[in-house]
């Protein structure tokens, strides 16, 4: 069979995957519905393989990149899951204290993609901490399906406390200047929004396709926001108009970008939802935003 290209896949398949990735379909239902699109030589197994993340060939910053130091640490989250593991990455040969960035994973734990984003952030001159909210359950299990199943077992507000504790840990780190931002994806986008609600001193928040806070919570935000949305992500985008209304009514500083013709997850370069142009542009904006507000 020929290699599948993104252009071979209908938008309905991407929408099905989104429902599956966000626990609206179990695997059996997903496979059943996927079978409706096995035409033109496509098979269910080939579609499943194509839609699944590829962590082998997609790292942009290797684990042993000579420009950075990257190691796993543990910090205490007394209101959350207790001792939490995270990947701490920073530029080598530090001569000055640097701003910090919390990198928040999706709804499946600290997988190789998010670890890579943590290292990418360090390459840009920040100290990054990418926690694993699955630590109390043994940590990211090595694949995203099991990771999603594990994360469903944890309370999301308790996990929010884990990332707030990461903020406190990084803020007091000896190599950090005390200015902290957060970037998060999917579930991590919601965490980023909620950290802005809970932490008025947070320096900057960049939620990628994240669920919005309630109107009451949104009105509490003091943190500058950079909001990154995907045009085809109707599920998350449904909450944007009300959120924007609250931001404007309360004079909350924000920038918002709606990237055309891309799906939820467009920054994740390990799946076919990835869009290189939107991912690169959004990341350039993210780094510029952090440099503006944290340096």
Image (cartoon, grey):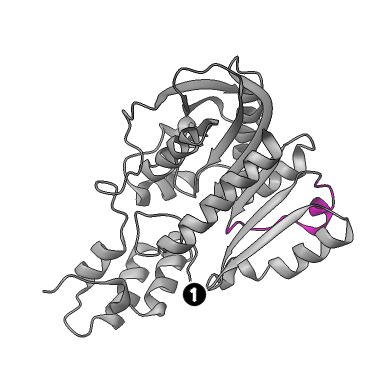
In the image, farthest residue toward the bottom: 40
Q: Is residue 152 above or below residue 259?
A: above
| Camera sees residue 17 | yes
Image point (58%, 48%), residue name:
286
The structure residue drawn at horizontal position 50% and vertical position 64%, both measured from the top left corner, is 264
From the image, give the main secondary structure of the stretch colored magenta. Answer: loop
Measured as percent of width and height from the top left, residue 107 is found at: 49, 50
Per the image, is 220 magenta? Answer: yes
Position of 51 compared to 1: left or right?
right
Viewer-nearest residue: 175 or 236: 175
User: Is residue 72 toward the left or the right of residue 281 in the image?
Assistant: left
Write down the quadrant of residue 277 in the picture.
bottom left
Residue placed at 61% from the left, 35% from the top? 163
Task: Give above or below for 180 relative to 6.
Answer: above
Is the N terminus in the top left, top right, bottom left or bottom right quadrant?
bottom left
- According to the image, label 1 marks what residue? 261
Q: Residue 288 at what x, y percent from top left? A: 61, 46
Q: How many marks?
A: 1
Secondary element under disc 1, as helix, strand or loop, is loop
Q: Which stretch did the figure color magenta?
A: 209-221
Q: Looking at the picture, how far across and down is residue 88, in whole percent?
A: 48, 26
State the residue lying farthest toward the front: 95
Residue 147 occupies quadrant: top left
Q: In the image shown, does 27 or 70 lie closer to the viewer?
A: 70
Query: Image height check: is 63 above or below 287?
Result: above
The magenta stretch spans residue 196: no
Q: Residue at x 84, y 54 (%)?
A: 216
In the foreground, 192 or 100 = 100
State the residue lying farthest toward the left: 1
């Amino acid at each position: 069979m020929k290699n599948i290209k993104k252009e071979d896949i209908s938008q309905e398949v991407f929408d099905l995957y989104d429902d599956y990735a966000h626990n609206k379909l179990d695997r059996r239902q997903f496979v059943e519905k996927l079978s409706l699109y096995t035409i033109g030589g496509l098979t269910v197994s080939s579609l499943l393989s194509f839609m699944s993340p590829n962590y082998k060939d997609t790292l942009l910053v290797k684990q042993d990149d000579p420009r950075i130091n990257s190691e796993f640490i543990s910090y205490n989250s007394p209101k959350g899951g207790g001792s939490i593991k995270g990947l701490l990455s920073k530029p080598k040969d530090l001569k000055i204290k640097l701003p910090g960035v919390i990198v928040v994973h999706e709804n499946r734990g600290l997988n190789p993609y998010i670890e890579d984003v943590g290292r990418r952030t360090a390459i840009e001159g920040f100290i990054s901490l990418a926690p694993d909210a699955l630590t109390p359950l043994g940590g990211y299990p090595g694949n995203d399906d099991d990771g999603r199943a594990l994360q469903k077992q944890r309370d999301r507000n308790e996990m929010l406390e884990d990332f707030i504790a990461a903020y406190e840990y990084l803020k007091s780190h000896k190599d950090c200047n005390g200015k902290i931002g957060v970037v998060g994806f999917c579930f991590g986008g919601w965490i980023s929004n909620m950290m802005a609600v809970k932490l008025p001193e947070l320096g900057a928040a960049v939620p990628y396709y994240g669920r919005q806070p309630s109107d009451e919570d949104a009105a509490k935000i003091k943190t500058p926001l950079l909001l990154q949305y995907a045009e085809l992500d109707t599920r998350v985008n449904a909450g944007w108009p009300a959120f924007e209304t609250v931001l404007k009514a309360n004079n909350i500083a924000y920038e918002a970008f709606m990237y055309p013709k891309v799906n939820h997850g467009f920054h994740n370069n390990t799946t076919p939802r990835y869009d290189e142009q939107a991912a690169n542009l959004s990341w350039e904006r993210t780094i510029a935003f952090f440099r503006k507000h944290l340096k």
